[in-house]
Each structure stands twice: as C-alpha cells, then as structure tokens.
Image (cartoon, grey):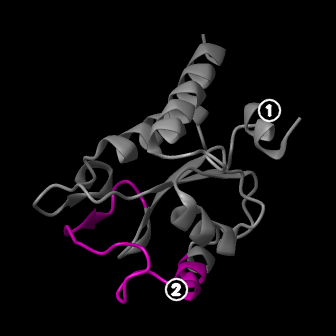
Amino acid sequence: MTANDYVDCFPPELVVIPCGSRKLGRRARAADLYVGSYHRACRRAADALRPDRLLILSARYGLLDLDDVIDPYDTPHGAADAITAQALLKQATVRDIVLLDPVVALGGARHVELVRTIWPHAHTPLAGARGMGEQMARLAVLRKGHEQQLM
C-alpha cells in the first residue's frame, strides 16, 4: 500500500483543490467563480472523496470556503501578489485546521508545494503525473472509483 492508497481507506478530513486561471468575469461564490475544466475535474474528484471539509487554494486569496464571495483576479502562483506560505499558515491557524488528518491535495506541483507547507503529510494522488492529460485521467479514476464505492 502506498501513502496515497490511504485515501481509499478513510474519508479525508480536508481536501484542498486549486483555483484556476479561467474565471467568471464578475464577483461570485468561490464554488462558482472558477470555470476551467481542470478546476472542475478536481472539484468532482474532491466531492467523490466526501471530505469533512473542502477548500479552494486561491493564488490571490489563499484558503477559500466554497461560499466565500470574491472578485475575479489574474494572479498566478508565484507572482508578487500571490498568497505566501506564511499567510497560508496564518489562515489555517485562524480556521483551526492545521492539525487535520487525513488531508488530500489535488493539483499540480505549485499547489501541492503550498499545501504541504501546512500539511506535510498531505496525500497527493496526482504526484508524479506527466502532464495535464495524465492528471485529468487520474482525477477521473479517483472520482469514478469513489462513486462506485458508494453504490
């Protein structure tokens, strides 16, 4: 059993998914703002895991609940005005979620790197994927596998 197979054994307390560059052009709930296919695939896979809590890691705003209402932005991870690991730790501390376990991080390397500054033990089912296509395929398998377990 690998570290990421653990995701199949216990429902996660927290799943953190990435934001996305494709957004609505107006203020909206975080759950609705991100409209890109990659974000939506991460969201569907996260929903299938049935976590206690699901958060979006926004490159600009940091940790977002699905109901948080925000303005669209154009800030990639690593930009001067992007969320920092220190600010992320402060947000997680205020939310009292630093000690959650298991935690699953769905997303690419930059996203996972930030998540792991708070939860170094986070499970990363997309780690080692060779590009977006392989990540999307893994997300589909993750979603379908967990949906079938519920039947």
Identify the amino acid type marked 1: Cys
**In the rendered view, does 41 fall on the left or right side of 94?**
left
* Disc 2: which residue: 87
Name the residue: 62% across, 17% down.
150
Name the residue: 25% across, 68% down.
70
Q: Which residues are magenta?
A: 65-91
Q: Quadrant of residue 25?
A: bottom left
Residue 38's place in the image compared with 27, above or below, is above
Label 2 neighbourhood size at 10 Å, few (<14), some (14-19), many (20+)?
A: some
- Marker disc for residue 58: none
First in sequence, mark 1 or 2: give its number.
1
SS at circle 1? loop
Please tell me whether the stretch drawn in magenta is mainly helix, strand or loop. loop
Q: Position of residue 141 (x, y in %)?
A: 57, 25
Number of dots carrying numbers: 2
Q: Position of residue 142 (x, y in %)?
A: 59, 30
**In the rendered view, does 139 fall on the left or right side of 103?**
left
* Disc 1: which residue: 9
| Residue 47 in sight | no
Name the residue: 75% across, 67% down.
120
In this rendered view, identify the residue nearer to me: 38 or 6.
38
SS at circle 2? helix
Q: Position of residue 27 (x, y in %)?
A: 15, 64
Say whether marks 1 and 2 touch (CB < 8 Å): no
Residue 34's place in the image compared with 81, above or below, is above
Q: CA distance from mark 1 to mark 2?
A: 32 Å
Quadrant holding the N terminus:
top right
